[in-house]
Structure formats: structure tokens, C-alpha cells
Image: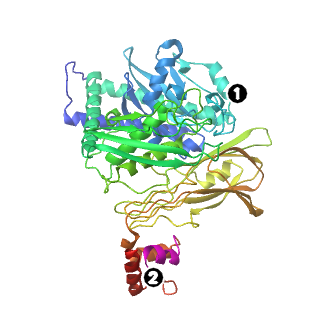
Amino acid sequence: MNDMSKITEVDPITLQVIRGAFETIAEEMGHVLYRMSFSSIIRESQDLGAGLFDTDFNTLCESESTPMHIGSIPAYLRGIAETLEDGEWYEGDVVVHNHPYYGSSHTPDLAIVVPIFHHGRLIGFAGNTAHHVDIGAATPGLIIDVPDVYAEGMLFAGTKLYRKGEPNNAMWNYIRRNSRAAGQLVMDIEAQVASARLGAKRFVELIEKYGETVVFTAANQLMDYAERLTRNRIADIPDGDYTAEGWLDDDGRNRDQRLKVKVTLRVRGDEVEVDLTGSADQTPTAYNVPFEGSTKVAAFAAFRKLLLDSATSEMRAPSNEGSFRPITVTAPLGSIFNPRAPASAEARFTQCNRMIDLIIRALAPVMPETVIAGSSASISFAAYSGVRPSGDYWVFLEVNEGAYGGRPRSDGPDCIDNLMANTRNNPLEDLAMHIPMICDRYELRDDAPPGAGEYRGGIGVVKSQRVLTPGFITHESERHTDAPWGIFGGTEGATGRCVIYNKNKPEEAREMHSKFSGLAVGADDVMAYYGPNGGGYGSPLKRPAQKVLEDVLDGYYSAQHAREVYGVAIDLDSETVDMAETGRLRAKLAQQ
């Protein structure tokens, strides 16, 4: 051991070595988790997060996984502290936790936490979260239209799967008997246990090498460093109150009631408050957001994106607690972003993504070279399910891509998760191997143009999934009524769509609401999802005519759209731009 009992600061070289060790441990935990998992939502999409935490529940490091998990586990740990079975941690314990009113992000995101002991003393925790394919809710995989949290499936609060190293067989059996996809669920939880145990082992190895005092001093320095970076970036924003608002389609039941999202940012010096006062009241369905585990996490993710982007920053900020400290979040109790128990709160993601979209919009006037235009800022999360001839359920969860808005120096990326979403797509070959489904169409959307601008918006996906047997579909999505916004002269993008039809009767297609629960479908029924297109950045008249020509030739929009919106005259036969006519068109449009 190389400990120094009175150390106040770790030298720069040792500090960077320990920082690298932290990051490697977190990444290794994440890799073990997704490589050992069996369900595609974890194995392929990598809907997970992992890291190390001290006894005050500060994040010491976390994996570079989906932003929706950034900073979420400390809230789980605080909830576990309130509910822990036996009320005490022992070596060899493993806890499972997912209660949304005790810190979880939402019920399908199970956390597995392992205590870390050194010489018999509790010194920290290794933990991870992952989205599970089915936890026994009222409908397979996902749930929206339910009355309360108890209909969301199994609730775990400080529950020990292992106590002093011995398995709690009654709890394992309970889990096996209460999921439609019990085999996948149990094996995925076992992968989480292995990941957490590995993190605990690696942390003890780090302490054995450098000493407890050195490691924790370094951890505190790294948290302080991340905090300084964040505060310095916030201080660059002029003090003031910045507001933006938008509308969500509905709550999954009351179709005629749009839901307001209002964001007010109060920047004061090197701190910022995200105030959600004025947003809709909580809903009678699962379309609410757990405050500790999701609302606050979305705000943290928003400012890490805006202020600490590794691609535009000279120095990369460590992924730890420090970057969260200058950010406070306010949401009235009883609102959609801070519901009262026992309101259901499983379908919480699209609200979080829209909050981030509005944070960006609110800051656009004072951060024009940093913000982007409106993104799809939603998520298409679909659960497909059915019953095999054996009587066993099959359940498949899929996240479909959206699109970013145009940016200060480039077009919005096409057909990709955005803002708080960053999961990977599921290979179609994997789908066909394991599930009675076939993908009939998977490409860039071609029925609506992206937002026009000097830098156009990104193009959303169109994906058509066909079930081969009778089954059920639940779909959580948004932005069928409120298009992604354009900025600085750019035009808005396109709203999303969802259509259900039978392969043999496509003329009888039904336009669906953005979210629906447990829809019964028959063999050869198809769900076609069209992701929203992003908004444009800057005036379309500033877009180089050659780029407009390339967009038309690539099929992103028509020659007529190019003429009417961009002021570019294109000869499709010769695949050229008529520059003289383009000059006249743009001069005319500029005067309008």
C-alpha cells in the first residue's frame, strides 16, 4: 500500500493515472454487462449505465453509455438507503432496486448495486442500471395506459438478491414466476451482478495499489475539476431568465388534451436552475416522469451536451458528480415532471427529451454558435409480443431512430437517436433469428422534407416491422402534432407518423396516435413508424445551390421544394443548377 494519511492533493501524474483507471473500470463494467446479456435491448441497443460511487453516493465514474443513465444511480442509492432490507450492508450483498418513488429512473430500469468493502469497512458501491425486456407489467414489455405504479410490474426497493454472499432463492423464484420473458430477465440480471462485482473487485485492486487516501483524494480532485469546468462554462452565459415551451401530443388515453412543457432557465453567475413550473399537471396514465431518477438526470444531460461536448472542448470533463453540482432542478409536486405517488411513471422518456430540446431553444439567443435547431426530441419505443405454440411469450423491445436539427456548421445528422437517447439499433438479422417478425422497410423517410436552412435538418427513419403471428404492440412516441422548430431563419421540420396495416390489405392502413398500449394485431400486420425530421438552421437562401442539387438528387426533397423554399432552379434532365434563374428566385424570395 502506498497511502499518505495527511495528503491534501495528489500529484498531476498520479491523478491522471487514477482518472484513467476510473474510466477503464466503468467502461469494463459496461462491456461485461452488454456482452453477457441475452435481451437485445441490452446486448445490442446497450440501454445501460455503470459506475463507481462513494458512501455519500457521489458518482466517481460512469460508463460512456446512453445519456439517459447519466447521473441516475445516485438517486437509486439514496432510495436504497431508505428501503434497504435489514437496514445494513454486508460483504457479499447484492441489491436490486427499481422503485420510481425511491429514486429509480423508471421501473424497467433495474439497478444492481454491490457494496465495496476494504479491510472490513464499507468504502463505496459498484452499480449499474439496464432496461429489461419485461418485468410483468399489465402489457408485455412496455406500459402506458395504466392507473398507478403498481400496474407497472414488479417493484423492488432495497431488495437483496444475495445476502452475505448467499442467494435469496425465494426472490429469484419470484422473479422467474412474474415475467413473460423470465429466461432473458434472469440472465440479464445475472449479467448485471457480474458487472457490479467486477467493478467492486477492480476498485479494491486500485486501492490496494495506491492506497485508500490517495484514491479518494484523487476522486475528490476529479469531481472538483469537473465542477470547475461546468461552472466556467455556465459563467460564460449572460445572467438572465430564458424560457421556451412546447406541447406533447397526449397522455396515451385522453387524446384531445395536449400537454404543455415549459422550461425556464435562471442563470446566475456560475450556477443555473432548470425550472419546469408551468408544465402540465401529472397524468392519470404512466406518462409521468420520476423526479429524482429522470427529471433531474435529463437536466444534467442537457448541460453536459451544451457545455462539455468533448468534440468542441479543449479539455474533456470527467464523467462524475462534479458536473452536476452547479445545476438545480425545480418541478412542482403533482406536475408531469414530479408526480405524486402512486401515479404511474413508466413512459417517461419523450418528456425528458422534449425538456432538453426546450433548454436548447431557450438558450439559442445567447448561444447561437452552440445550439442546434429542433431535433425529433422524442423516442419511438415499441414492444412487440406474442405467445409461441409452446405457451411461452416472446417479447421484443425496439428503439427507432429520429433526427437532429441543423447545426451552426453542418446539417443535422439523419436517422439517429438524439439528445438524451443514444441507443444502438438492433440488427435485422438478429431479429429474424430470434423473433417471429420481419422488417419490410428500413430507410430514410421520403414522405416529408427535412427543415430547410443554410444547414438542413436531419431526416428521420421509416421502419416497417411485420409480425408473423398474432400478437400485441405497445408504442411510446411523440411529436405527431408539434414539429421540430427551425432557428435563425430555418423552417420547421416534419412531425412523426405511425401507421398500422396488414401486408395483404395496405389500402386499409390506420393512422395511429403517437402512443398506444397493448394493441392486438394479427399475422402479417405491419407497424410503420416515420420519425420526425429535424428543423433547419439559418436561412435556406444561404444554402449553397450545389448542396441543394445534391439533396434533390439524393431524394431528400423535390425539385419543386428546392425552387419554392431554397430558391434554387434545378434541371433534373441534366442534373444541373440554372444559376441565372436561381439568382432571380433568391432575390425574389429575399424580398418576401
At 42% across and 27% down in the image, what residue appears? Answer: 201
- Would residue 85 be seen by someone viewing this image from the given angle? yes
Residue 36 image point, x, y percent: 54, 38
Q: Quadrant of residue 275?
A: top left
The residue lying toward the viewer, choosing from 580 and 174, is 580
At 56% across and 66% down in the image, what residue appears? Answer: 448
Q: Is residue 434 left or right of residue 86?
A: right
Residue 544 image point, x, y percent: 37, 74
Tell me which amino acid carries mark 1.
Answer: Arg
Task: Tell me if residue 12 comes above or below residue 500 in the rendering.
Answer: above
Task: Give the Cα distance between marks 2 and 1.
Answer: 65 Å
Residue farthest along the right direction in this orientation? 389
Magenta stretch contains residue 564: yes
Tell me which amino acid carries mark 2.
Answer: Ala
Q: Give the range drawn in magenta.
A: 556-569
The residue lying toward the viewer, choosing from 137 and 586, is 586
**Numbered label attached to residue 441:** none
Q: How many labels does the image show?
A: 2
Q: How crowded is mark 2: few (under 14 residues within 10 Å), some or many (20 or more)?
A: many
At 53% across and 72% down in the image, what residue appears? Answer: 555
Q: In this view, does 448 lie to the left or right of 240?
A: right
Residue 493 image point, x, y percent: 49, 61
Q: Residues within 10 Å of mark 1 (few under 14, many from 20)?
A: few
At 45% across and 64% down in the image, what residue appears? Answer: 491
The residue to which callout 2 is attached is 569
Q: In this view, does 46 lie to the left or right of 141?
A: left
The residue to which callout 1 is attached is 177
Give the mark nearer the N terminus: 2 vs 1.
1
